[in-house]
Amino acid sequence: MGMITSIRKRLWVVTVLMALALIGFIVMDMSSGGSASLFNNPDTVGKVAGQTLSWAEFQNTERVLYANSEVDYYGRKDYMWNQFIEKAILDKEANYNGIGVSPAEIKELEFGYNLSPVIQRNFKDPNTGQINREQLNTFKQGIEDENLDPRLRDFWLVQEKEVIKDRMYNKLGAIVSKSLFMPNFAIERNQFESNFRLDFNYAIIPYLAVPDEEIKIEESDYVEEANTKKSLLKTDEETRSIKYVVLDIIPTAEDSNTAKTAVESKIEGFKSSTDDSSFVVSNLGTWNDAYLTQAELSPALKDTIYKFPNGTVYGPYIENGEYRIAKVLDKKVIPDSVKSSHILIQVKTREQYLSAVRLLDSLGNLVKTGKARFDSLAMKFSQDQGSAVKGGDLGMVALGRMVKPYNDAIFYSLNKGEIKTILTQFGVHLIQVTDTRFTTNKNAIHLAVIGESILPGETITNSIYDEAQNLIQTNRSLESLEKAVKEGGKYTMELAGNLFLNSYQIPKLGQNSNNTSREMVRWAYAKDTKVGDVSTEVYSLQEEQKKYTNKYLIAALSNIQPKGFASYEPYKEQLKGDIIKRKKFEKIKEKVGQIADLTMGLGGFVYTIDTAKDISPFSGYITNLGEESKVVSNCAKLSEGQTSQPIMGEKGVFICKLNKKVIPPVEPNLDPFRAFYVHPAKNVAMSYVMKALQKKNKVTDYRSKFF
C-alpha cells in the first residue's frame, strides 16, 4: 500500500517521462524521414500556391499520358512537374483575376466549334490533318451515357485538366499582353534602331595567327573569366559536383573470336538460301531493299564487293562493332529521278488493310490487262485528293525525297510502266512508275547482310566489376581514389559539375544514362554523404544500341556549392576557349600597336580588307560573317573616315574604318508606327510571368523522395 501511495505522489514524474518519450519518438520519426505521416502527407510530391501536389495523382497522370511510351523516363516527369506547378498557380490566379473556365466553356472547348488546342492535337487525323469528329463524338456519347471504358475515362479526365490549364494560361497571357504599352520614346527608339545603318571596311586577323603554344593559362585566369560571367553562373539552388571513375568494358580476343565463329557458321546456309529476306530476318539481320552506290558502302566493302558475281557471300569483315557477312543480290544502274503515280487507300485497322489490298490488286489487274487506265482509276478511287485530280501523278522526284517504302519501290523495284502495291504510314498504295531519268548513271549494289556483335563476355565483365569493387574498398576518400586512378593509368576520372537536387542528366555519359545519372545524384544528395566520400555502389551503363553493359562507374562527391554562384570548375573547358581568345587578342593588339588608318600589313599580319554595307548596329550581324555584336557596336561609335583600334571579335581581331553612318531623322508623327511596332515583350512575357509567380508562391519540392 505504501508503494502505491508513493507512486501516486510521483505520478507527475511518470507523466513527464511518457511525454518526453513521445516527443523523442516524434523527433526520431522526423529525423528518419518518416515525419510525413505526422506533419506532412506521405503522398505529397510538392506544394505551391496553397495546393498540395499528390504523388498518387502524379503517377496516375503519367500512366494515362505515357502508357506504352518510350519518352524519356525523367524528362517526362520533369515536364509533368512543370505542368502541375503551372496548373496550381493558375488556379490561384483565377480567384483574383477571373481567368477560371466555366462548365459551358469547357464543353465548347472539348466538343464545340472552338476546340481547345489540346483537343485539336489529340484528335487530329494524321492522314487528313483534320479533326476526327467521329472519334470525338464517340467520347462525348460515352461520357453522356456514363458507359465510357474506364481507361478512356481516365484519359479524358487528365486531358480535361490540360484543357482547363491551357485555357487559363491563354487568358492570363491575354491580360498580360493587353497591358503592355509602348510609350512614344520606345516607338522612337524602334524607329531609330530599324533605320540606323553603317558602311565600313574591315580587316580580320584570325586568332590562329598566334599559336596555341604561346598561350599559358593560370588558375587565376579561370577565376577572372568566371567573374566576368557571374550572371551565367548564378543559381537559386544548392549544387553539388561529382567526380567519377569510368571503367570501360572492352571485349577480349576470345569474345571477338566467338562472334566471328558464330557468323562463319551461317555462311553456307546463306550461300544456298533461295529466300534471302527470310534467311536474313530469321538470323536477326535487317533486310533493306535499297541499292547502295560505292560511296555509300562501308570502307570494308567498297573496294572489293563489286568484283564478285551475284550470289557470292563475302566475309566475315568487321563493321560497327560486328563481324558481318554480305551476300551480293543484284547490281544495276539506278535512276537519278523517277516520275510516278499512285492510288492511295487510307487504313487504320487490319480489316481495312486487307480490304484495301484486295481492291488495289483488282485495280492493278485492270491496268495490266488494259481494261482500264491508271489515271482514270486514280481519279475515281484515290483518297489522296491532291494527286487524284491529276490522275495520281506525283511528278518527278529525286532519290530519297519520298517515304522509304515508296522511295525503295520506285527507285529499286520497279521499271518504267510496272506497278506494285505497298504499305506506308499514309496507307496502302498502288504505284506505277511512268518515267525515269538517268543523268549520272550511278552503279549500285543490293546486299543482304547478317552480323554478330562483338560483345564483352561474362569473364571480362566480371573481372572489371571486381576491379571496381576493389577500387572502392581500398579507396574510401576522393583523394585516395584520384591517386589510385592516376597511378594505375588504366581508367579515367571525369567531373560532373553543378548538379541540382533533381538533376538526372550527366552530359558526358549520354542521354541513355539518365537512370544511372539520377542514382548518382541521389547518392550525392543523401543526408550522410559528405564532400570527399566515395560511393559504396558500383554503377553500370549500357551501350545505347545493343543494350549490353559497357561501363562501370564509381562516384565521389567533390563539392557542395551553396545557392548563389555555381562553381566555375565544371565550366573550365568552356572558359578556356574565351581565355585563349582574350590572351591572343592582347598579343595581336600589342604587335599591331597604335593604328592611324586601315592599311595592309599592320603588325606584319596577313589579311584582306573587306567591305560591309547597310549594317544595323543593333542586329550585331555582319553579312557573310554572322554575329559580331562587339565589332558592330564599336563601329557605330566611330566618326565617318575614322579607323578603330583592334576590336576583339568572334572570328578574330577586327580593325574597322567607318565609311558612312546613316542616322535616321526623328519622326514628327509616331501614330502611323504605333500599330506597326509590336511590344518586344509580347511573345515572351508569359514565360517571365510564370517564373515570377513560381518565385512568389515559393514552390516546395519533394520530388527527390520519390524519384
Image (spheres, rainbow, N blue to C red):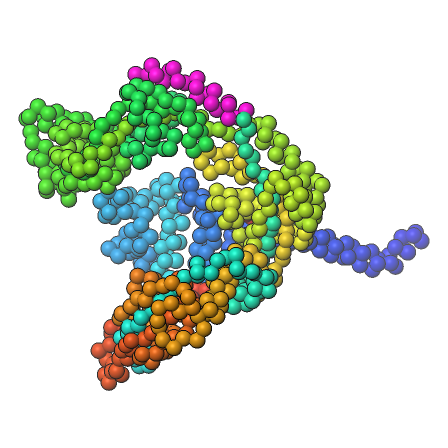
The answer to whether residue 342 is left or right of residue 702 is: left
Residue placed most toward the observer, 265 or 71: 265
Looking at the picture, does residue 688 appear above or below residue 212?
A: below
Residue 178 falls in which quadrant of the image?
Answer: bottom left
Write the start and end of the magenta stretch as one range.
254-278
Residue positioned 44% across, 60% down in the render: 209
Residue appearing at x 34%, y 26% in the figure: 304
Q: Is residue 294 magenta?
A: no
x, y percent for residue 489: 63, 41
Q: Is residue 260 magenta?
A: yes
Question: Residue 353: x percent and y percent?
Answer: 24, 31
Residue extending farthest bottom: 668
How would you classify the magenta stretch by its main secondary structure? Answer: helix
Where residue 37 sits: x, y (%)? 62, 51
User: Residue shown at 28%/33% (left/top)?
Assistant: 293
**Left or right: 14 as drawn, with respect to 449:** right
Spot occupied by residue 45 in the image (x, y as percentages of width and height):
54, 53
> Count of labels shown?
0
Say if 614 sits above or below 701 in the image. below
Report if residue 148 is visible in the image: yes
